[in-house]
Image: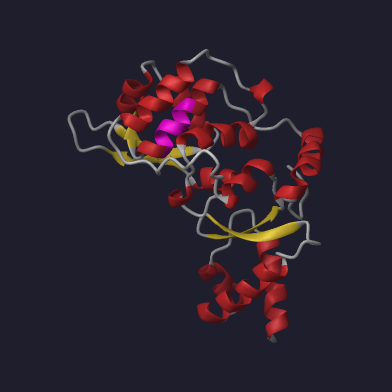
Amino acid sequence: MTHEELKGALEAIIYAADEPATVEQLADAVGLDKAAVRAALDELVASYASEERGVEVRAVAGGYKFYTKPQHHEAVRQFIKSLRPPLRLTMPALETLAVISYKQPVTLPEIQEIRGVNCAGVVKTLLEKRLITTAGRKPVIGRPILYRTSKEFLMRFGLSDLDELPSLKEFEQLARAALGSDEGIAPTETENERSIAAAAESGSATPPEPAAEAEAPPQVKAAAAGAEPASPEGVS
């Protein structure tokens, strides 16, 4: 297999894959060592970075996946909206997702202590939408279940790992964009501000608050704005 054939094969696999394709998976598929695959991937990523390309190959959730570029997000969003309703969450769900994101792994009682309300139903919704998953049990009396964000969460927000999480305030804004427009989110007076502030002040370290003019990481902005291109089987 020539170098150009290798890049073509990797491009086809990444396009066809439903989940981000890891270097190990790609190396096994083409029968080459990981160093050669990484080198070809770097060239593939660079080739899609040019302005005339409408999509890019992005490292996300431990693998590689195709995404539309942010500058085309509005056209893509309008097209996707015409095919199926976007995934939307209520404001309580967004608040709970923010708490889990920045406090994980966290138990239901800990989430409820921060938010000040019963969150069992909201946590169930987030589990059903695969934005969070269980992470074992906490070694305390009662052994409550621990929750953390999932690979679907990383994919939805275009994050390579949790180190790329934006500030808490940016998270809420990006969640609105990535998970549904404002009209799909139920307003709740100032409850959101109170619970988000509580999450930030309740003990665990959070990413540092950026200056007012600082922008969110480009991967997060792209995920909030863009959408994935249709798979070979079409939009489901």
**What percent of the width, then of the height, locates residue 144?**
28, 31
Does the image show residue 209? yes
87 in relation to 64, above or below: above
Q: Residue furthest bottom?
A: 2
Residue 67 counted in the magenta span = no
Position of residue 160 relative to residue 128, above or below, is below
- Label the magenta part by its dominant secondary structure: helix
Is residue 10 among the parts visible in the rendering?
no
Residue 201 quadrant: top left
Specify whether 111 is left or right of 25: left
**Residue at screen point 48% across, 21% down:** 192
Q: Nearer the viewer, residue 168 or 29?
A: 168
Which region of the structure is painted magenta? 95-101
From the viewer's side, name the closer residue of 134 and 201: 201
Name the one closer to the observer, 161 or 219. Answer: 219
Q: Is residue 109 left or right of residue 209?
A: left
User: Residue 1's quadrant in the figure?
Assistant: bottom right
Query: Residue 27: image x %, image y %?
Result: 56, 75
Q: Residue at x 46, y 39 (%)?
A: 167
Q: Is residue 98 magenta?
A: yes
- Is 70 drawn above or below residue 51 in the view shown? above
Going 41% across and 20% down the picture, which residue do you hit? Answer: 194
Closer-to-camera residue (30/78): 78
